[in-house]
Image: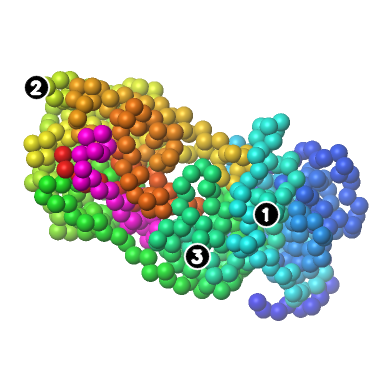
């Protein structure tokens, strides 16, 4: 860091207004009276709860050393920290000063700040996120420059408690905002007690790959629910993994490391501790450790034997003809998945992608993928699908995402029964002592309210070595709108589950209808379930023993298909009927080719099950 002149004689005044998304706490606790000029310290502003006792009030000449400057984005400003801390571990010594324009201060400046204390909620109050204590509309006076920064507080396995968060206050609708912080007992309280302060992590293992927004996730607890590839597994609602921390850069994005899960940021990564909409507590790094490769490589599964049927699910993330990922997806299907007999594809977009002009056909999208698979040395797949009603199935506006079946006609045949379309439901009937679909391909209960603005399940009837196999391709509603793990409400609300629960009941009922006709029918229900293997959604799918989530055949540490905020977790699942589960020879593989890598072509890992019908 370049040295500055030791003294600036002129005062620097920066006028600012709060951003539109900011939220000001209009009331403060009764004990917080007017702030005496020149006597208020940063820890007084922060207080011992998540909300400042001075929220909404004017403060004068709050002193600190500038520890970080953010001159980009919608939250321009800088952090200051008091180099003379108090003896209360619950009160932070740092605070963010929101300027709304590129700040005219530098790291190492000693400043005094006068302005209004506010509580800014990233994402707005409806998000349920915690707030960030800020000083807004500031007048800033630079007292001196080139000062040593307050020593960074180390965030480590030893400092972060095992317990994640306190239970929210019932009288405050489950909010933890009014509770006194207990940083030695709860991880979220520990991080909150460091809000705005200069912190550091050392030799931190990467558990969430670098994303397009130049951010990644590390853990300071490498032994916390680890998997063999360096990630941190989210295996229950009570295992939030307290060691996770997001890293962003205060420097140029071009210098940010391109990290994969299992890599390590060696040495020191340090900077102010922020809180943002997309990851909660975030180290805004002034300096970033050196990236050391963990050697994580893309996986390949084994090829199915002549007697095994291989069925896979793969979310290809809004694939449309304009994308440049067809060859990479084809390589994954041919060389990583070993050309499964049946592939359920999710997020196939229509022939002109997000262009919203009424187009719903996807033959060009699927055709390009089939051609790319042949070019990669794979079979020429055939395919089946049903075009949705325009703009009725959610997803990217104009994209009309849907599921589609690829199948290898040299290994498996498709039983076509016409009549299925976007609004016509397929059913189950008895034919020569066995179960059969009335429409194949067909949609399951497309008019049911469970599928409002969501993808409808696609059912198909296949024959392998003379045995009928029913395959149901799903893409349940997303988790969008759920409160994050770091929300002010603890435990956080998961409102999106309501629709997935309804969807799971529809699919479970349909499978039971098949099994009622033939109890030993082979049924595979698979896709992007958008929920965990331990979730209520999965339990409803499994109700009555109709289905079983085959990912549970893997060790708990290996159950994941997606990495979100540093948590390796299950979203994609393959569920099977009792005859498939107990028929012997069932093997399951979550093939890690995307979710752990910064250069992913999809954010989901494909899944494959092999069995002998």
What is the x, y in percent for residue 384? 18, 37
Quarter containing the C terminus: top left
- What distance separates the C-alpha of mark 1 from that of mark 2? 66 Å
- What distance separates the C-alpha of mark 1 from that of mark 3? 20 Å
- What distance separates the C-alpha of mark 3 from that of mark 2? 59 Å
Going from N to C along the chain, the mark reached first, 3 or 2, is 3
Side of 521 relative to 159 (left or right)? left
Determine which quarter of the picture holds residue 168.
top right
What is the x, y in percent for residue 215? 51, 59
Mark 1: secondary structure: helix
Side of 121 relative to 594 (left or right)? right
Q: Is residue 279 magenta?
A: no
What is the x, y in percent for residue 46? 77, 52
Quarter containing the N terminus: bottom right
In this view, the residue in front, 592 or 283, is 592
Side of 108 relative to 328 (left or right)? right
Q: Is residue 587 magenta?
A: yes
The residue tagged 2 is: 432
Q: Are marks 1 and 3 in contact (CB under 8 Å)?
A: no
Going from N to C along the chain, the mark reached first, 1 or 3, is 1
Q: Work out whether 577 lies above or below 17.
A: above
The residue tagged 1 is: 190
Tell me which colouring the rendered structure shows: rainbow
In this view, the residue in front, 215 or 611, is 611
Range of magenta residues: 576-604
Can residue 271 be spotted in the picture?
Answer: no
Going from N to C along the chain, the mark reached first, 1 or 2, is 1
């Amino acid at each position: 860091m370049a040295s500055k002149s030791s003294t600036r004689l002129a005062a620097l005044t920066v006028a600012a207004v709060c951003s539109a998304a900011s939220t000001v706490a209009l009331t403060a606790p009764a004990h917080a009276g007017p702030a005496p000029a020149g006597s208020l310290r940063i820890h007084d502003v922060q207080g011992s709860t998540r909300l400042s006792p001075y929220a909404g009030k004017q403060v004068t000449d709050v002193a600190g050393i500038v520890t970080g400057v953010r001159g980009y984005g919608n939250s321009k400003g800088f952090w200051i920290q008091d180099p003379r801390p108090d003896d209360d571990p619950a009160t932070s010594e740092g605070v963010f000063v929101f300027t709304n324009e590129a700040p005219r201060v530098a790291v190492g400046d000693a400043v005094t700040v006068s302005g209004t204390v506010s509580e800014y909620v990233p994402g707005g109050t409806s998000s349920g996120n915690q707030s960030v204590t800020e000083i807004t509309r500031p007048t800033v006076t630079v007292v001196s420059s080139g000062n040593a920064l307050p020593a960074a507080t180390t965030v480590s396995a030893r400092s972060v408690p095992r317990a994640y968060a306190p239970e929210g206050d019932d009288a405050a609708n489950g909010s933890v905002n009014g509770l006194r912080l207990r940083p030695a007992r709860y991880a979220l309280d520990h991080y909150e007690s460091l809000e705005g302060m200069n912190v550091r992590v050392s030799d931190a293992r990467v558990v969430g790959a670098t994303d397009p927004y130049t951010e990644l996730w590390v853990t300071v607890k490498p032994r916390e629910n680890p998997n063999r590839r360096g990630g941190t597994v989210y295996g229950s609602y009570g295992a939030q993994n307290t060691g996770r921390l997001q890293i962003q850069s205060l420097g140029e994005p071009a210098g940010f490391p391109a990290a994969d899960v299992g890599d390590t940021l060696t040495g020191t990564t340090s900077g102010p501790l922020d809180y943002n909409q997309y990851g909660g507590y975030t180290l805004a790094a002034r300096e970033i450790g050196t990236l050391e490769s963990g050697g994580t490589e893309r996986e390949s599964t084994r090829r199915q034997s002549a007697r095994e049927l291989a069925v896979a699910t793969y979310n290809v993330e809004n694939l449309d003809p304009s994308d440049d990922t067809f060859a990479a997806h084809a390589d994954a299907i041919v060389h990583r998945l070993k050309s499964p007999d049946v592939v359920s594809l999710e997020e196939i977009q229509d022939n002109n992608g997000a262009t919203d002009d009424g187009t719903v056909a996807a033959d060009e999208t699927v055709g390009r993928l089939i051609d790319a698979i042949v070019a990669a040395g794979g079979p020429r797949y055939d395919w089946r699908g049903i075009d949705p009603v325009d703009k009725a199935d959610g997803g990217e506006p104009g994209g009309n995402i849907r599921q589609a079946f690829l199948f290898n006609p040299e290994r498996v045949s498709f039983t076509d029964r016409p009549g299925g379309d976007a609004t016509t439901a397929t059913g189950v009937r008895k034919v020569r002592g066995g179960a059969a679909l009335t429409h194949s391909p067909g949609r399951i209960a497309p008019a049911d309210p469970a599928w409002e603005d969501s993808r409808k399940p696609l059912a198909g009837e296949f024959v392998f070595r003379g045995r009928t196999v029913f395959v149901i391709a799903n893409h349940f509603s997303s988790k969008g709108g759920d409160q994050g793990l770091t929300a002010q409400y603890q435990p956080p609300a998961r409102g999106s589950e309501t629709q997935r629960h309804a969807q799971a009941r529809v699919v479970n009922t349909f499978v039971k209808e098949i099994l009622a006709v033939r109890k030993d029918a082979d049924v595979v229900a698979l896709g992007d379930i958008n929920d965990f293997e331990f979730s209520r959604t999965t339990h409803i799918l499994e109700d009555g023993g109709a289905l079983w989530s085959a990912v549970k055949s893997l060790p708990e540490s290996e159950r994941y298909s997606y990495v979100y905020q540093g948590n390796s977790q299950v979203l994609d699942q393959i569920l099977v009927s009792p005859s498939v589960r107990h028929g012997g020879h069932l093997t399951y593989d979550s093939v890690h080719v995307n979710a752990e890598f910064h250069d992913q072509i999809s954010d989901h890992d494909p899944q494959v099950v092999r069995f002998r019908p």
